Each structure stands twice: as structure tokens, then as C-alpha cells.
Image (cartoon, rainbow, N blue to C red):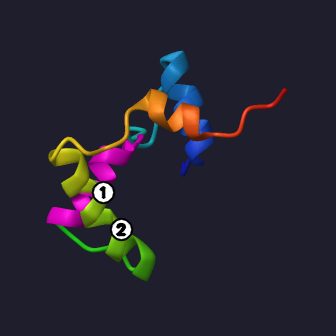
Amino acid sequence: MKMTSKERVLAAVRGLPVDRTPVLLWLNPHAACRMMAEFQPPADRGWRFFGPRFWRWRHEGRWPRNEDIRNALPHSP
């Protein structure tokens, strides 16, 4: 029986048999930028331009700190 991804995950969590192992692939922004810079460029032109630069900035220590990003965001009153 073929299971949907939701059925597969729920069955695996409950310890029931599944048709195949559920897999979750998640990339954080740093890993995504590194992949774009070093392995395979993305299809989108904007990401092809910014991805490698973001990774280089991160590698050089010029990546903005979380508090810098938070301070740049507009604050609600």
C-alpha cells in the first residue's frame, strides 16, 4: 500500500510499519548559501548572484549578527 507523506510520518511516530522511511531534509540559510556557492548554482538569477556572495560574507565574518538584523527591523509600538 502506498502511503502519503503525512500518513507515513504519523505511522512512524506511532511505531507502526511504513512503506518506506520518512525523510525530512531541511537546510539552514548558511548551508543553502554554501551549496549555491560551491556545488550547484540555483536556477533563479537573483539567487545565483546573491547566494555565493552571502556564503563568502559568512566565511569572511561579514555576515550580520542576529541582533543587527533584529535592530534593523521595524518595531511596532
Residue 61 visible, this orientation: yes
**Mark 2 → mark 1, Cα distance in angstroms:** 6 Å
Residue range in magenta is 24-38
Instruction: Please say whether residue 18 is one of the residues in the magenta stretch.
Output: no
Quadrant of the rendered structure where residue 46 is? bottom left
Q: Label 1 crowding class (10 Å Cα cut-off): few <14, some 14-19, many 20+?
A: many
**Disc 2: which residue:** 50
Q: Residue at x 31, y 44 (%)?
A: 63
In this view, the residue farthest toward the right is 77
Foreground of the two, 58 or 34: 58
Instruction: Please say whether residue 28 is one of the residues in the magenta stretch.
Output: yes
* Amino acid type, residue under disc 1 in the picture: Phe
Q: Residue at x 25, y 65 (%)?
A: 52
Q: Position of residue 61 (x, y in %)?
A: 20, 41
- Vertical placement of residue 8 versus 77, above or below: below
Foreground of the two, 57 or 40: 57
Residue 44 visible, this orientation: no
Foreground of the two, 8 or 75: 75
Label annotation for residue 54: 1
Q: Main secondary structure of the magenta part?
A: helix
Q: Position of residue 24 (x, y in %)?
A: 42, 40
Q: Position of residue 7 (x, y in %)?
A: 61, 38
